[in-house]
Structure formats: C-alpha cells, structure tokens
Amino acid sequence: MIRYKSSRQLSLEGFHLPFGGKLNSENRWVKWSHTIPWDKLATGYYKSMSGTQGRPGKDARLVIGAVIIKHKLSLSDEETVLQIQENPYLQYFVGLSSYKDEAPFTASLFVTIRKRMGDVVFSSFEQTILASLEEKKTEKRIGPSEEDPVENQGKMLVDATAAEQAIRYPTDLSLLNECREISEALIDELYKLTEFKKKPRTYRQQARKKHLALAKKRNPGGKARRKGTREQLQYLRRNFGYIEGLLDLIGGRCFPLPHKRQRQYWIIQHVYDQQFTMYKDKKRRCDNRIVSIHQPHVRPILRGKASHKVEFGSKLSVSMVDGIAVVDRFGWDAFNESTDLIDQIERYKGRCGCYPEVVLADGIYGTRANRQYMKEKGIRFGGKPLGRPKKKTSKNAEQIKQEKQQRRQDALDRIPVEGKFGQGKNGYRLNYIRAKTLKTSEAWINSIFLVMNLMVLFRVCCLFLFIQLKAIIRELCESAWEGIWSTITRKPMRGMLSPLMGM
C-alpha cells in the first residue's frame, strides 16, 4: 500500500545531529539531493503499488535514494544498508529528518524493490529526467512554438551492448558434473521417503575422481574432453533412471519434494538433452543453450570482440539523446539490433515531439529498410553509403571531400554512446550483474542507467547555476561601472578633469 508523504528535504539547519555540529552544504550528496526531482520520481514509483490494500510500504524517497546509493557506489545490498546507517550525509540524501543509528530497512527488502520496479516505473523515471533536463535548457533549445512547423531536431545515438551476469564460466564438463551432483542429492532425498534399506548405487566417488582428473589438466585434448563428457552423461543417465523409479514407488499426483528441487530436476533434464545432442552430432552449439543451472535464462551473446568473443548475460539496445541513455530493448537472446532502429526513432518522436535530424549508429544499422525509412522521414544517417564509392573527378572532388569529413565527424560524435557503456561497465559494474532472476536482473540494469542519467541531470543543473551566477555577476559589474562612469561625467567632476583630458 502507498504511504503518501512529501519528499521535500529539510534544510541543513533542520537536520539534527546528536553529536553536535551541522552538515556541510558543499558535500556531494547534499548538492545532488537538491537537483533530483524526488516528488516526480515518487509518483512513478507508486504506480506499481496499491493505494488501498496491503501493508504501508517504505517512503518512496528512502527506497529510490537507497537504490541510487547502491549503484552509485557499487555496493551489495547489505553494505548499502550499513552505509546509510553509518553516514549522516546518506541519511540526509534519502530524506531522513535527523540522524538515526539504526538500519532504515532490512537488506532483503532490496529483492522486493527490484521485483516491484518494472518497465512502467523506469519508463516514468526516464520521462521525469527528460522533462527536468528540458526545463534547464535555454529558450532556443526548448523547441519550436505551436505556430511554427515541427521539423527534425537533435541527434540520436544508438548502439547495443551485453550486460554480463555473475556466473561461473560455463564448460560442458562443469555443467554435467553439477547436474550429476544435483541428481545425486535428489536420489538421497527421495530415498528417505521410501522404505528401502539399501540406497541405489550412484558411483559418485568414482565420477567425482574422473571429473577432477580432467578438470585439473591445464589444456586437455579434444579426445579427453569428449571421453569425460561421455562418462558424465552415462552417470547422469543412470541417476535419472533411479529418480524415475523412486518417483514411481512413492506415487502421488504431486512431486514429493519442494518446488525448488522440482525446478532443478527439470533444468538438469534439459541440460542433459542439449549435451547429449551435441555429443552425438559432434557439435559445439545448440539453440537456447543453458549455461547456468541456477540461472537457466542466461544465454551466450556472441559479440565478436578480441578480448571477449562471447559474453554470458542479457543484450541491451540503447538510444542516447543529450547524454541521457534509455534502454529501448532488453532481451536474453542474441538479437540483431538493426531491427530495433525504427522503433527507437518512433520512441524519440514520442519523447521529443519530432523526429531526429540525424541518427548516429554503427554500420550494422544501415540496412536498406532502415535507410528507406529514414529517407522518408527526412532523417540523415551518419554512416557510409551503400554501393561502390563515387568515382572522383574534378567536378565532384570537393563534394566527396565534404562527405568524407562529415562521416568522420559523425564517427566522432558517436563516441559518447560507447563512453556511456564504458562508464556503466567500469564505474557501475554493468558487466557484473549479481541479480538472480529475469525481473530483478532487468531492474538492476535499469537502476544503473537511472543513476547515470541522474548524474547527467546533476551536471546540467550545476552548469545552469554557473551560467546564472555568471550573468548576475556581469549585471552587477555593469551596473557598478555605470555608476562610476556617471559619477565621473558629472559637471563638477568634468571640469576638474578637463586639463587632464586636454593633455
């Protein structure tokens, strides 16, 4: 249930410290808290909650502020709660009226928060940040008036990246060994529900020794790996037979073990089918390949880069305007990002009210369908044209030179979107997502982009205040100089200065 409360922060003088003194107004958390539109963000957060049912939830500013602190400092859930408990500046940032030496909430609440913050909530956050950024622009950049025709304006940068999950690097042998261990645990638990005196023989010690003997080798050959895979498949197939026999003896309509164990049983069966098919066909790939038992939704994403040819996680399709990055598509399968360009342009029009003037993207986006669509909408594509290069002559030499310079400038202007991915992965651990489920992983990634966008808003606000302060100082200097000049040019003063002026 929604707990309605204003998110307006008290002044620094009103924040009570039990050990005396006051907070420093120049602290980064104090400055940042004054630039974030808390009330508007709270309105978006409350969209996922009921206004009449359920227990009253935590204040929206406390929750959103805790999420921002967690991803800004790249902390775990437990460490975030401890940092808020120990730091008065962080307590001021999340909206508390005084310092309290107690945890604001339990760390496990972060899981519920991530489940609650879905696409609707983060879409509302994005609209709030874009609206706040628009208010800080000058009148010339706010946009055309209602009487003027709407024309294409602005630059849209698009690109895709992969957000890696925090999983162990998958190999066929390690996956099969883990499946075998889970099947042995299932046999032990099912055996306890029967009246047999002798437990089925699983050869687990022998299977473990064979797995370790191969896993400890630095570079095992192809024959050795194939032999180890065959052995683990045989052990696993034998265990499946025991499990089915025990289930038949126990009987009943429902699975006798908890849902977690039933889910694991389904997953290891699917892994066995995939691995057996690849072993039989002598292949190294299959569709919808499972690379983690505990996170079966994670897929290998082929990126084709020198350092990381394959990344294991989700794929993001991102558009960026004026430094604000928006996740337009989130998926676990490796998709072709060029198919998202038309939808991204339409979303740009929905946010800004007009189509972009130019789209800066990688060469993969320059398909014929995308080029034809952009040509119809009057949008310039900042990429290399299709077909053979024009033959250079004396007449078109200058035009070819200008087009080449324009393509080079477009390539330079596209760098910020690559820098945004680098900022997310190096500064906010976008390449190490530690959430476990599909929904919480998506909320984790969207929270990282939320923090980066709020940092852009903070820098724009600081720049806007600097410009205002500079204008005020200029006006004061001009008014002071006018006063001095008017004093000098008075008649008595002019008479005293006439001899000097004659010199």
Image (cartoon, rainbow, N blue to C red):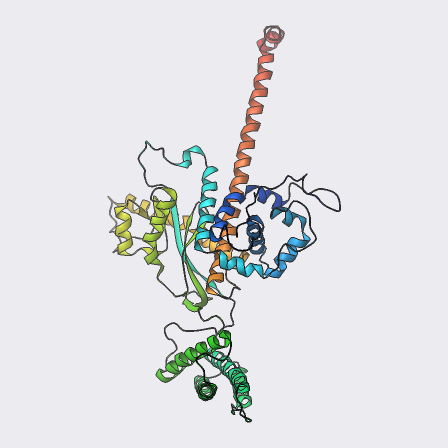
Viewer-closest of 149 and 119: 119
Residue at the far right in the pictured view: 19
Q: Residue 447, percent across and down?
A: 50, 55
Q: Quadrant of the C terminus?
A: top right
Report the side of 416 relative to 287 (left or right). Answer: right
Question: Which quarter of the figure has residue 341?
Answer: bottom left
Report the side of 294 relative to 150 (left or right). Answer: right
**Residue at the (43%, 33%) spot, across then down:** 139
Q: Is residue 76 visible?
A: no
**Residue at the (33%, 41%) spot, across then down:** 152
Q: Residue 331, percent across and down?
A: 40, 62
Viewer-closest of 205 and 189: 189
Q: Is residue 413 visible?
A: yes
Q: Residue 477, percent across and down?
A: 58, 24
Question: Which quarter of the figure has residue 480?
Answer: top right
**Residue at the (53%, 40%) spot, across then down:** 461
Report the side of 56 relative to 125 (left or right). Answer: right
184 w.r.t. 123: above or below = below
Q: In this figure, what is the number of numbered marks?
A: 0
Q: Residue 315, percent across and down?
A: 42, 62
